[in-house]
């Protein structure tokens, strides 16, 4: 999963970055389970419940962002990502160190050689468990944080506020279902984590069952994307019900400026097939094979799709389905989608501030 930081550039503060990203993606970020600002920090979570909490200042001459990432797996570690300027990357010699100061007190110092460099993203990654535990504890108690690189080539500092950081961790715990568990970041309790997580991100085709991989792998695959026929796995997810029934959602086809098509697959174990998805069309109830900008809510057992008439998000089609376990000929063994709500607004009138809740209802049909 690539960081959402890659979607914003040239904005001086985290607030500006949030505004820019939301404006670019519409009223609600496509295919995102969560996207929420807490003062100077932002939380973003995928459909597979990998979550990021980050602060960014894109005009900074040193580091441009500090991002914490955690997957949904029980006891998953937290990794730290530091996006740097090209000048700072050039300064990062083998002798350099990166120090972290909370309210001017140094709590952690890491040699650059112990950081993983991802040059294509201009990013340093750190994930030592003991070091991250110490840093996270100090960040929750502090007011400001300074990231300082020192070496023979010089020094550079990036200072950022911690206002909203604790609230961001609470939100990550809540989204990932860790509240009250002993593996929570902030909302700790005595409850042990489950043996496994019910959902995960799909980041490579190797994670797909053979029964559906043919739709994505190869030049003739029906869901191939890109000029070279390469699949897009960003935002793909795999949700398992309690009895090994599954729902897999995968980007299928080339995305437009603000609409990413998805295919949905259901079944039991590794035996899955593409679902026919109930929908209200102009002529009445029917089924469709593709939905757009999918959002998954595993607690509410709901799936949403929002086809945007344009990027502003003030027109289009919003649909909500409930997720159930069952066995039907049309929807595959073990997975049933039931259309709960469908709203449509064909007129793009610039009135999108209130979202879709006031759009005309197409389903359920109101009695005349």
Image (tube, rainbow, N blue to C red):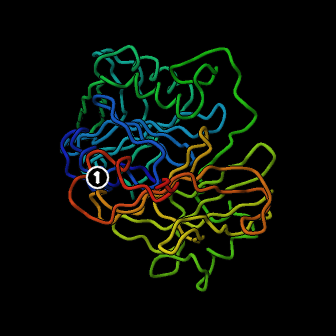
How many circles with numbers are drawn on the protein? 1
**Closer to the camera in the image, 340 or 337:** 340
* Front-most of residues 156 and 334: 334
Quarter of the image for residue 309 reads bottom left
Mark 1: few/some/many CA within 10 Å (<14, 14-19, 20+): some
Vertical relation: 228 (above or below) 255? below
Under tag 1, what secondary structure? loop
Q: In this figure, which residue is indicated by the disc labeled 1?
A: 8
- Residue 105 seen in this snapshot: yes
Front position in the image: 88 or 265: 265
In the picture as drawn, the residue positioned furthest to the front comes out as: 368
Task: Using residue 182 as the reference point, say whether residue 15 is left or right of it.
Answer: left
Classify 171 as above or below 349. Answer: above
Q: Position of residue 18 (x, y in %)?
A: 28, 43
In percent of width and height, residue 302 lies at: 58, 47
In the displayed structure, does residue 268 sit left or right of residue 249?
right
Name which quarter of the figure residue 77 lies in: top right
> At 31% across and 30% down in the image, what residue appears?
147
- Which residue occupies the extreme bottom position in the image? 220
Task: Give percent across and percent down for residue 8.
Answer: 28, 52
Between 245 and 347, the one lying in front of the other is: 347
Position of 219 with respect to 156 (left or right) is right
The residue that appears at 76% across and 64% down in the rendered structure is: 332
* Residue 294 seen in the figure: no
**What's the residue at 63%, 21% (across, down)?**
181
Residue sitting at 73 percent across and 69 percent down? 330
Percent position (x, y) of residue 211? 76, 70
């Amino acid at each position: 999963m690539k960081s959402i930081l890659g979607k914003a550039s040239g904005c001086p503060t985290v607030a500006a970055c949030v505004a820019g990203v939301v404006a670019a993606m519409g009223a609600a970020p496509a295919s995102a389970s969560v996207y929420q600002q807490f003062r100077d920090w932002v939380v973003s979570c995928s459909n597979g419940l990998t979550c990021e909490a980050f602060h960014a200042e894109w005009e900074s001459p040193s580091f441009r962002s500090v991002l914490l990432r955690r997957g949904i797996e029980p006891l998953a570690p937290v990794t730290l990502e530091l996006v740097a300027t090209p000048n700072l990357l050039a300064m990062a010699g083998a002798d350099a160190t990166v120090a972290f100061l909370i309210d001017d007190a140094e709590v952690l110092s890491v040699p650059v050689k112990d950081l993983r460099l991802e040059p294509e993203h201009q990013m340093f990654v750190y994930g030592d468990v003991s070091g991250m535990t110490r840093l996270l504890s100090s960040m929750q108690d502090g007011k400001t944080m300074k990231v300082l690189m020192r070496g023979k080539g010089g020094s550079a500092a990036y200072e950022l506020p911690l206002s909203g950081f604790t609230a961001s961790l609470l939100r990550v715990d809540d989204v990932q279902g860790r509240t009250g568990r002993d593996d929570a970041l902030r909302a700790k309790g005595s409850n042990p984590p489950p043996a496994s997580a019910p959902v995960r991100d799909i980041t490579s085709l190797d994670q797909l069952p053979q029964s559906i991989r043919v739709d994505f792998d190869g030049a003739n695959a029906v869901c191939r994307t890109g000029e070279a026929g390469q699949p897009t796995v960003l935002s793909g997810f795999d949700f398992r019900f309690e009895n090994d029934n599954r729902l897999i959602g995968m980007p299928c086809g080339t995305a437009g400026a603000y609409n990413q098509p998805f295919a949905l697959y259901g079944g039991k174990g590794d035996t899955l097939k593409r679902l026919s998805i109930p929908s209200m069309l102009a002529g009445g109830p029917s089924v469709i094979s593709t939905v757009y900008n999918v959002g998954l809510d595993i607690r509410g057992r709901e799936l949403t799709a929002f086809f945007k008439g344009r990027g502003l998000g003030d027109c289009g089609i919003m649909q909500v389905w409930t997720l159930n376990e069952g066995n039907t000929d049309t929807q595959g063994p073990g997975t049933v989608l039931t259309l709960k709500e469908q709203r449509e607004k064909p007129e793009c009138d610039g009135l999108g501030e209130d979202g879709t809740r006031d759009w005309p209802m197409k389903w359920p049909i109101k009695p005349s």
